[in-house]
Image (tube, rainbow, N blue to C red):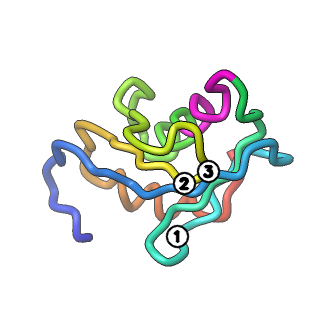
Amino acid sequence: MKETARALEEVVLEVRVQPRASRNEILGYQDGVLRLRVTAPPVEGEANRAVKRLIAEAMGVASSRVEIVGGERGRRKRVRVSEVPPGSLERLKAAGGKAA
């Protein structure tokens, strides 16, 4: 996906999450799916909140712009990011393999 110099209204990411990991990190893309690890357990939405924070931090957007729109109770999720500033997707891709 090529990003233009202007902001995008929204993007939807396919995400695979490993909860209860030793650290929060973005592993990168595999087969078009963004792989993440979060330390939070999958209890009462803790892991989902950690996913939102991790993606928001990597993309440089407020966590209020990140919403889980599918898979709230599973490891595979669809995450929508609204009002995406220029360069955010590149920052997310570059974050692969780095702990947060």
Mark 3 residue element: loop
> Compared to 61, does 12 lie above or below?
below
Q: Nearer the viewer, residue 66 or 7?
A: 66
- Which quadrant of the figure contains the C terminus? top right
Displayed quadrant of residue 91: bottom left
Q: Position of residue 38 (x, y in %)?
A: 71, 43
**47 is within the stretch colored magenta:** yes
Stretch in magenta: 44-51
Displayed quadrant of residue 5: bottom left
Alpha carbon of mark 1 to alpha carbon of mark 3: how far? 15 Å
User: Which residue in the structure is indicated by mark 1?
Assistant: 29
Q: Which residue in the rendered view is the most extreme toward the right?
A: 22
Horizontally, is 76 left or right of 50 in the view? left
Mark 1 residue element: strand
Question: Could you tell me the amino acid type at mark 2?
Answer: Arg
Task: Kindly indicate whether the residue at mark 2 contacts the one at mark 3 (C-beta within 8 angstroms).
Answer: yes
User: Which residue in the structure is indicated by mark 2?
Assistant: 76
